[in-house]
Image: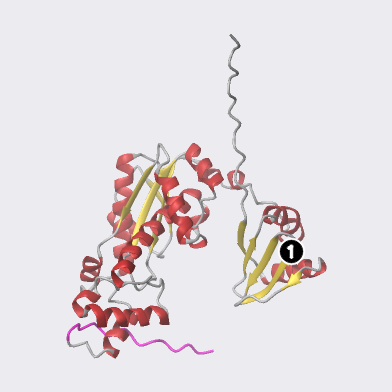
Amino acid sequence: MAKRKKKIDIPEEPKKKTLYTKKLSDEQMEKLEGVCAMKNWEAYEVEYARFAFKGEKVNVVVYNSGKLVVQGKEMENFVINILEPEVLGEARYGYDEIYHPEWFELHAGMDESGKGDLFGPVITACVIADKPQIDEWVKEGIRDSKKITDGRILKLDKIIRETKGIAVETCFCGMRKYNELMSKPRANLNLLLAWQHAKSLAAALKRKRAPWGMLDQFSKQDLVGRYFKDSKFDLRMQTKAEEDPVVAAASVVARAEYVRYMGSLSKRFGENLVKGASGETKKQATQILERFGPDSFCEFAKLHFRTAYEVVSDSGMLDKLPLKPPPAKKEWRK
């Protein structure tokens, strides 16, 4: 009888990345615009963009803020062979483990979601992982949640939570409790956020111990240290910490939790609630107030937001829902 051939598992190639972002200086923006123009790439209009070009399987957009967005199948080729040598003058893409070896050590990552949104709670998340899991997430393209669509965020959240050998914890207050806490005389959103971060970090460390953690800094002061006491744990903070893959994973988890919560609020409202605090959210807030009444308004909106006060005031319901007037807007002088 012929022997059955042993099946050989061929490892999958890592998924090709198609999105790259970076902050550019004025000089770098000028250089890049010249490089794209020299290649005779097609220029096109993008709102709030300084310039935008379409190349061969790659789009290059530079916004007025200086943010560069490169997207397309040839993104990596463009960054490695054009952007870095001709504009940036340094090779860094794909070298995170060389420049930041600590990102690939056992550590905790912390981030939050919902802080600037009128609807829904503020959610903190803590993720603890070691090198094998971090390497896997980098291959999956897990990055800062602000750069990912809601549909993709839920898929990545599932990947993170199903990864063996990690710890994931979130913390948030229901909307009624949130508004109750924020209505107290000395309430402060950053202090509440710090308390939530301390809670999610402490819970994660009970499941998997790590020597240190990185927090995406939201305050100049070490507010989390007021609520988290562990002399054997080194809590570090920095802005734009989402470049750390574990902080990026925490940002994905926090955002996914927020998306799910917003989904339940949207279902109750009858249509998708808009994130942020724009004119569209103000319109929806007015509809919520009229449809559900002032007593239930706090189950949808953050009542300490200026937009919430304006909606209640414009609807003539301050007698039924007496909100504290927001501070006067500062006039900026040139």
Q: Residue sitting at 45 percent across and 61 percent down?
A: 150
Q: Residues within 10 Å of mark 1 (few under 14, many from 20)?
A: some
Of residues 276 and 205, the one nearer the viewer is 276
Relative vertical location of residue 191 with respect to residue 198 in this rendering, above or below: below
Position of the C terminus, as image quadrant, is bottom right
Image coords of residue 228 (percent x, y) = 30, 52
Name the residue beneath numbered marker 1: 55
Q: Which residue, as the protein is rendered here, is positioned at the far front?
A: 1
Q: Residue sitting at 70 percent across and 51 percent down?
A: 91
Whether residue 120 appears in this view of the structure is no
Left or right: 234 in relation to 30: left
Left or right: 303 in relation to 209: left
Image coords of residue 320 (percent x, y) = 17, 84
Of residues 207 and 254, the one nearer the viewer is 254
Asked whether 297 falls inside the magenta stretch, the response is no
Main SS, magenta residues:
loop
Relative vertical location of residue 301 with respect to residue 55 in this rendering, above or below: below
Image coords of residue 192 (percent x, y) = 29, 64
Whether residue 67 appears in this view of the structure is yes
Secondary structure beneath dot 1 equals: strand
Left or right: 173 in relation to 209: left
Left or right: 24 in relation to 194: right
Q: State the count of labels.
A: 1
Q: Residue sitting at 40 percent across and 37 percent down?
A: 165
User: Which color scheme is applied?
Assistant: secondary structure
* Boundaries of the magenta span: 320-334
Of residues 303 and 26, the one nearer the viewer is 303
Position of the N terminus, as image quadrant, is top right
Q: Residue sitting at 41 percent across and 80 percent down?
A: 280
Image coords of residue 130 (percent x, y) = 46, 39
Q: Amino acid at mark 1?
A: Gly
